[in-house]
Amino acid sequence: MSEETLNPTENQEPQEEKPSFKMDLYFWTQALIMALVFLILTFTLAGRVIGVIGSSMVPTLHEGDMLLLQSIGYTPQQGDVVVLRKPSFMADPVVKRVIATEGQHVQVDYAAHCVYVDGVALDEPYINEVMEDPYKSLMTVLDVVVPEGSIYVLGDNRNASSDSRHELLGTVDTRYVLGRALWVVTPFSHFGAIE
């Protein structure tokens, strides 16, 4: 008999041990927990998710859209879509567009169907329809210089929006701003960045 026949295991490669089901489960659980902690920290420290209530931001946003907000380190800028909460105005958070920031002069001209900031008519391709005079007694904040630390906000659906034109809201202290709306995350038919 040859040597090969005497030691049949000598030429075979050693078999690798298969990881056990328990080890797989441990590693997947650990990865899931780490991902969950990352998401919680991200949303707690950097942003949050809030739903849209009402139609004041149509066509940009629709009722039921879930928005991802940037909260930490955000300073409102003209043109941004923001979520704010002023309990004396409305119990739920509201979504509006920043039209002007501190020191800017806002004029809402219903006759011209236009909003002016520092004497310049805004180019507003995002609005739903031509702005009409709402003929509501509380919608009187139409000519104002925005105070320090405040913003002036309007809905994109001007004819169905209670916003800074309303006496109970007026210019908004930036401390009421919860954050800038960055993305629509659901429904998936509306998924994408907010402009």
Image (tube, rainbow, N blue to C red):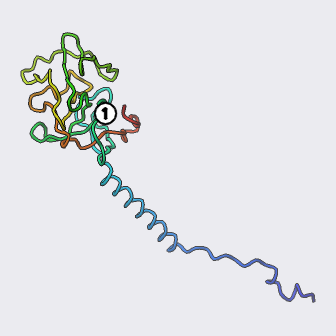
At x 19% / y 43%, what residue is drawn?
175
Residue 87's place in the image compared with 108, above or below, is below
Picture coordinates of residue 124, whole percent (x, y): 32, 21
Say which residue appears at 27% left-offset and 34% top-offset.
Answer: 63
Residue located 31% across and 48% down the image = 47
Q: Quadrant of residue 152?
A: top left
In the rendered image, residue 184, in percent from the top left (x then y), is placed at 36, 38
Of residues 113 and 189, the one drawn nearer to the viewer in this rendering? 113
Give the amino acid at mark 1: Asp
Q: Is residue 112 left or right of residue 188?
A: left
Report the side of 153 relative to 139 (left or right): right
Q: Which residue is tagged 1?
A: 80
Q: Is residue 118 above or below residue 29?
A: above
Please state the horizontal and vertical placement of residue 83, each as a whole percent of the image: 25, 39
Residue at 30% across, 40% down: 180
Q: On the picture, is 24 further left or further right than 43?
A: right
